Amino acid sequence: PKVNSNDFKLEILETSALEDITQVVQVMEDCSQFGISFSLDDFGTGYSSLTYLKRLPASELKIDKSFVRDMLHDTDDLIILNGIINLANTFQRDVIAEGVESIEQGLILLRMGCEVAQGYVIAKPMPMDEIVKWVKEFKVNKKWTARIMYNYKSIHLGNYFTYAEAVLARIKKEQELFGEYGPNKDLYYIINHPSPIEELNKILEIPSIEGA
C-alpha cells in the first residue's frame, strides 16, 4: 500500500542513541530527508544531557513509564515529570507519557502541559484487525477533554485577536496532522460549524476545574 513517509515515526532508545551519537545523528538526518521523524524512547532513563538533546534531531520525547507509575504518590517522580515536560517545551519537542493507567494520572499530566499519552487507561494491546474499529469508536474521557479546553484558554494569542480564534487555529492544525484519527476529533465539528467562533466561546466558558 502507498504510505506517506511523513506518517512514519521511528522510536529510538535514549541509551542506544548515546552509544555512538555521531553515527546515530547521521542516520537520523538521512531518514529526515525522506520525511521520517523520530521519537526518543524511555527518555530520562539514560544519561540525559542538554548537549545530546540539542544534537539529536528527534521531534518527540517519550517519558519513561517508571516516572509515571508512582506519580500520584511520589513527589520526586512529579518533579522529574515536570522537568522533562518543561525541557521538551524549551527545545520545542513534542512530549508523550508512557504507562498512563488512570484518569487521575492523565489529569495531572495535562495540568503540567503533556497532552499525549499511551497506556492501559486508553487501550491495551490488541490485534491489528481491531485497531481501526477502536480508533473510530474511541472517545476521550470527558475530564480530560475539559482539562484540554481549559489549557486552550491559556494559549498565547500571537497573531489572533481572541482566544477562540487561537483555539480554532489549533484545532484546524490538529485535524490537518491527524485527520479522523486525531486525539481530539470530537472537537473537529467546530471547523465546519456555521458560527465556529460563537460555538467555541460557548465551549470555552466551562466550569472551573477542581485543582486547576
Image: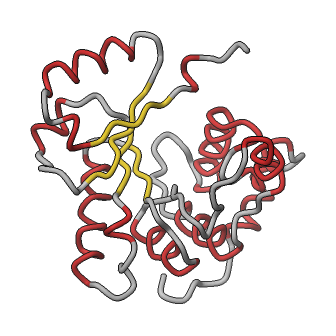
x then y, percent, for residue 79: 24, 74
* Residue 158, image quadrant: top left
| View extreme (right): residue | 194
* Residue 18, image quadrant: top left
Going 17% across and 19% down the picture, which residue do you hit? 23
Considering only vertical position in the picture, is 8 above or below 114? above
Considering only vertical position in the picture, is 212 above or below 142? below
x then y, percent, for residue 159: 49, 40
Going 14% across and 37% down the picture, which residue do you hit? 52
Going 46% across and 11% down the picture, which residue do you hit? 34
| View extreme (front): residue | 127
Judging from the image, the colouring scheme is secondary structure
The reply, left or right, for residue 178 in relation to residue 54 is right
Screen quadrant of the N terminus:
top right
x then y, percent, for residue 25: 22, 22
In the foreground, 113 or 101: 101
The reply, left or right, for residue 46 in relation to residue 152 is left
The reply, left or right, for residue 159 in relation to residue 143 is left
Going 56% across and 48% down the picture, which residue do you hit? 161
In the foreground, 65 or 153: 65
In the foreground, 41 or 203: 41
